[in-house]
Each structure stands twice: as structure tokens, then as C-alpha cells.
Amino acid sequence: SKPAEAVKNAVKTASGKIADALTPEVPGAPGSAPPTVEEPTTPHDPLPPKPEQGAPRTRTPTGAETGAPATANGQQGAYLTTAQGARLRDTDHSLKAGPRGPVLLQDHHLREKITHFDHERIPERVVHARGAGAHGVFTAYGTAEAVTRAGFLKKGRETDVFVRFSTVLGSRGSADTVRDTRGFATKFYTDEGTFDLVGNNMPVFFIQDAIKFPDIIHAAKPHPDREIPQAQSAHDTFWDFVSLHTEAQHHTIWNMSDRGIPRSYRTMEGFGVHTFRLVNEAGETVLVKFHWKPKLGVHSLTWEEAQMLSGMDPDFHRRDLYDAIEAGAYPEWELGIQVLPDTPEETFADIDLLDPTKIVPEELAEVQPIGKLVLNRTPTNFFAETEQVAFHLGHLPPGIDVTNDPLLQGRLFSYVDTQLTRLGGPNFSQIPINRPHAAVNDMLRDGFHQQAVHAGVAPYRPNSLDGGNPFPAGDDEHAFLDVPVTVAQAPKVRANPASFDDHYSQARLFWLSMSPVEKEHIIRAYTFELGKCYHQAIKERQLQSLANIDPVLCAEVATGLGLPAPQPTEPLADVTPSPALSQVGGEWPSDGRTVGIVVDPDGDLDSIDEVRRAVFEAGMVPLLIAPHGGLVGDLPVQRTFATGRSVEFDAVLLAGAPAPAPDAVPAPDAKAAKAGKAAKAGPAAVDPRVLLLVEECWRHAKAIGAWGAGVTVLEQAGVAGTPGIVTAGSGAEALTAVRQLMAAHRVWERFPASVA
Ligand code: HDE
């Protein structure tokens, strides 16, 4: 209508004579006609979604674009230009007063190029700085429909996701395979708003209240004076804190277990840690714990492998994730929930569901699968996607709500707050990787790095000038529901419920659920970490906590430290072990695992290609290892004895017995000969680097198969006839037997186990 038009024009030209001339027509202005625009009550003319709300641009594993806009690679056209689009003739020479003269301040291209470079880095995350990400798809089974109204969990719904895995303690450039907790953060771009499930690979946390997060992190990060050690918990300040602050003991034993050194991000479980509340269409609620279960099973490195990899390939997990996706071995997880009744006590089987240092054993509440996650695309640009992605527990779709877990409550504040400095202001949700795939119609405006050109004049409610938009959604229009949980009347206190005082029962439950091999690894981990501490009092205090978890564990670690084992100061909890916590046992697919094939260029090469293909067809990665690069016969060599090391392979096949290189360090026998001692007569010498590879694979309990001349290597390495060593008539036979062994992940009986 005419007056409404006039209002808009008046605002657009809100100064000077034209506006003055229109003033009498502004409704409600003194002397103007009475307004004819009615207060709008129903939505109409909604603002269209902002143009930049599209999905972040991605590509398939083979590099093909997936619906990307033509200019989305950030480059437009063939010519080099300035940031303003002026074409450049030269970007290699500064503008100078003659070839030998001084550089001129007027060189705007030089200054633009250097200035931009100077500001390329942003602060790294204060925790979880080191990470690797991937895109994927989540498909819902529909099994959660009864307990949640969340649309993306309805049967068959597919939702785009981005996952970022991380270590916690290390800086951005630190090694992947350190002993640490791993982050497992998933962004579901649902059509009802983004859902972030910001979890870890361990189901419990060090602290019960967010207010202590700076304390645990200050203790675990490098010492403030020398800034060492990097990405390690094996130092005094960490053990000082956790031995004084005994609620950390449960999480700590998880870190000391094999869970602290995953084989791959693909072989990690994930946990939401806190208890969440789901609400269905009828408004009924349940409490749940989220679990990610990897299709490949839960597998770990050995500590020696982890340490070697930190030097040999600090990017081991990042590379593994990228390579697996690029090779088409898409990592998969099932999302599951433990469904627990929402009672006023918020407990289940006497376990306080608000205490994030406690699990609900799976034997008491089954993990029910509700959907499948497949990671099928690698990021196009690490910085734009993996570095700039911003997760937040408060990114919740309708149907999923929070509980009063005091750790969770503090996190609801922290994640947005940290992005303000890390991503430079409040508009980080406009960065491509963070853009919701649901239409956004907020009233948030301006701020650093505002990307949107918002139309309209009324980013407030109620308004009449923008047609009343945006409108609140009703209950039947997929609006978020804050579950109206009754808050108990209680005095305002800084205190925990009494149930939070139990610090040892579940650490003991975890210990007693481990197989002998896993117990041995835990003992060694504590012995290593405490052995790295300088302060005797800290070691003694931690031994006291171990005594309260289990006297056998305590005694073994005390022996390793050369200290007396203290007596428990609390009665040992009477707990029922949870077999689901053990990683040992079961058979698992071998998708995307790596098999090294040692070949002798001068040996029998007949079956090599056939074996290589068979490994590939079994969904695994064959890597040919030879003394030199290039070709062996007509087959390409992927690793040489200089670039390949045992820790990269899940199993090794020996197709030949390569002789030592002519310039190699003499073998022990040759040394003996030099010293005038008689050398033992035996088979022809094998390159010592192959023997080292076999010895390490043996120590790390990996399957090794040999045929033909390869059998000699087993004999010379002294491992022939031991468990998990296969000698076969052909390469095909060796591979079949090795694959069977790989299904159990490792040849467990090779590990010593001093504790039953
Ligand atoms: Fe985090 N955490 N956290 N955390 N967290 C961050 O947020 C924080 C906690 C987790 O790949 C930070 O964007 C507090 C538990 C992951 O980008 C920060 C508390 C769990 C990631 C933060 C916790 C996590 C983070 C740093 C105690 C498992 C990486 C940068 C109450 C359930 C996400 C950032 C990514 C990152 C705070 C405890 C998981 C500072 C205050 C428990 C996976 O906001």
C-alpha cells in the first residue's frame, strides 16, 4: 500500500530534503494521516535464505567437483591479480629505484602480498589444536523415532556431516600418535539446524565441573617455564594434579590403557560423555548416552609403535584418514544410544547420570544403533575446513536437549566464547564450513567479518516495517523445545552431590574388565609416565590412588618405579567387570589396512603381482618394499628399505630374501670374522633392514607370512615357528593365512602378560 511504500522510501533516503518532504506521510508522525498498515500477525513474504547458505564446496575422492560453483576454488580467471582484481605483470621482484637500488614504499603489490602473509595464522585451539577432518553422510535407521522428534533421525534421512578428530594436549604441529585422549567432534548439517556432537574417544572426563577445566589443562600442558614436554602427560604437573584430584583417576586409567594410543581414527569408538535428554513428538523424555561404534572394531597401536611413529611419521593418523578415504575404504561408524529412563533422581542402576566421570556399562543398558556414518570426502582446504570449523554443544536441533551435568553446562558457555578470539568475532557461523544447511533468519547483525548483506530495516521483533518477519515457529513447525524440566528448590551452593565423591569404583571396574595383555599395557604405561616424573612425592601419591583402584596394579607399577606399594586407604569397590570395555577378542574386517610385501629384485618375482592384486581386492593397501625405488620387474616399488619401516604396516609378506647392499654396515657375523672369530656357516645373509622389519613386526605382534626364499628371512630373524608366523607354499596361501590372523588385529599371545 502507498503509506508502507512511503515509509520504506523515507528510511532509504533518511536524510536531507527528500526525506523531509516525505515526513508528513510517515504513519504516526504528528499531523500525518492515521496508519493504514495493520500489525501483521501471520508470516508472509519471508526473507529468502541468504545466498551464502549453501553447503561448503567439496570434491569426491578422485578430485571431481561436487556441485561446486564455478568460482568456488577461490580463483576467478587465468591471470594473476591483486586482491582488488588488477592484473599483474610481475610478482617476483619488488619495485626498486633501479636494479641495485632501494625498494620503494609505493610498491602496493609488495605491501599487500607481505601484509596478507603476515596475518595468515590464527590462534590455535587452546585444546584439541591438532586435528584432521573429513566430510560424510549420516543415514538414520529410524530406530530413535520413538524417543526423539529430531527430523534427521527419522528413518532413511540422510544428513551431511563434517567430523574433526583431534588430540587434546599437543600444538597444531605435534605428533598424532602420542598418548592422549582423542576428540571426535561431529557436525550434522540437519535441515532443522546444525547439531554438534562434540565427543571424545573415551566415555568419561577428568573433572566433574567445568570450572576446573583450566586447572586440568594447565597441569597437562607443557611446563610454563621451559614449555616441555610437548603433547605428553608424562610429566610432573599432570601427575601432580591427577594424584591430588582423585576424580581424574577414572579418565586417567583410560588414557594409560591402549585407548590412549589408537591405531587409527577409523578404529576409535566415540562417546558423547555427558547424559543428554531426548524429547519426542508427545513431549515425553528419556536420558541417553551417545556412542559411536567403528565398523572396523576398536584397535590400538603398541606403545613402541606409537613412539616410533611420532618420529617416523608424525602425521600417521591424519595420513591414514586421508589415504583411506581417497582409496575408497570409507570409514564407517554406527551411532548408538543407551536409553535410560528420565527419573527425578537422574540415576540408573545407582550410577549418577550427571557425573561425567561415570559410565553406564553396556551390559546394563544396551547400546542401540540409530544410524550410520560414512566418511567419504576429504577436505579441499585444511585451513578453510578443518581449522575453521567451530563446534558447540549448544548447537542442538529440536528433539535433543541438555542435562544439568555441571561439566556440560560450562561447556555450553566455553565453545562460543573461544571462537570469538580464535575466529575473530561473532560471525564464525558464516564461514563456509560452519554454515547451517537449514535456512537462517536470525536478527544477529554487523560485527567483525560480516559476510552477509542483510536486506530489510527491522532486525528486531516485534516489527511492522519488515512485514513482521521473522516469525517465531510454533510447536508443530519444528521449533526447538527447551524441555520444561522442573528445577528442584535448593539453596545456591558451590558444591557437588555426595554421589560425585566416588572416585575409584569405576576405575576399578575398568581395570578388572581388561584382558591380561591389556592389563600389562596399563602397568607399563603408568610405569613409563610416572618414571618420567622427577618428584618422588608425586609418584608416591599416585601409587596411593592405584592402591585404591587395585593392589595388583599398584604393586606392579611400584616394582617398576622401585618404590614400596602402599595399602589402600579405602575399601575396594565390589564391581562386576564389563567385557564390552576390552578391545581384545572378536574378529574384524581388514578394510583399508596396510600390507607390506618385501621383494628381492634378484629373486623369484613370478607371483608378486598376483599377491599384490589379491591384497587390493581384499580391500587392503599393498605396498611393495624393495632395496631401491623405481621398478622391480615391471612392478612399481612403494617403499624402499630406507623409507619403509615396520610401524607403517599391519602385516608383512616376505616374498624374497634380499641380500645386504654392497655398502651396508657389516652383519654381525662379518664383524665376528673381522675380529678373527669363526663365522657361523648358514644361509646367505639377508639385508639387516629386512631383519629389523621382521623383528619389529614380531615384537608388535603382527602377522608375518613367507613363501619361497622369504622363509629364510624368518629363520634368520629367529621367529620361525612362533605364533602368528605363516610359512606357505605360495603367496596366495600366505595371504589367506595372514588375513585370518589380521581379523583378530594382533597375535595377542606374543605379548607377555604378567598379570592374570
Ligand atoms: Fe572441549 N573444548 N571442553 N571437551 N572439546 C574445546 O573449543 C571445554 C570437554 C572437545 O575439533 C574448545 O573450539 C571445556 C569434554 C573436542 O574443533 C574449548 C570443558 C569433551 C574439542 C573447549 C571441555 C570435550 C573440544 C577449544 C570442560 C568430550 C575439539 C577449541 C567443561 C565430551 C573440537 C574449541 C574441534 C574443544 C572447552 C571438556 C571435547 C576451549 C570448558 C568433556 C572434541 O571451547
Image (cartoon, helix red, strand yellow):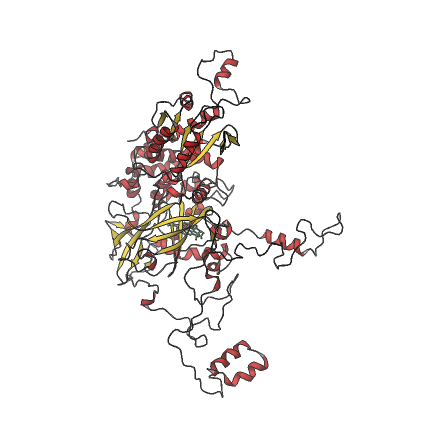
The C terminus sits in image quarter: top left
Q: Residue at x 52, y 20 (%)?
A: 666
Vertically, is 375 above or below 648? below
Closer-to-camera residue (232/209): 232
From the viewer's perspective, is 313 left or right of 331? right
Q: Position of residue 71 (x, y in %)?
A: 54, 57
Q: Residue at x 49, y 86 (%)?
A: 30
From the viewer's perspective, is 660 left or right of 194? right
Quadrant in which residue 412 is drawn: bottom left
Closer-to-camera residue (142/310): 142
Q: Say if residue 564 shows up in the picture.
A: no
Q: Position of residue 63 (x, y in %)?
A: 49, 48
Closer-to-camera residue (582/204): 582
Count of numbered marks? 0
Vertically, is 706 above or below 349? above
From the viewer's perspective, is 422 left or right of 500? right
Q: Residue at x 53, y 61 (%)?
A: 449
Quadrant in which residue 653 is drawn: top left
Q: Position of residue 406 (x, y in %)?
A: 35, 54
Q: Say if residue 622 shows up in the picture.
A: yes
Closer-to-camera residue (439/556): 439
Vertically, is 669 above or below 191? above
Q: Position of residue 292 (x, y in %)?
A: 34, 47
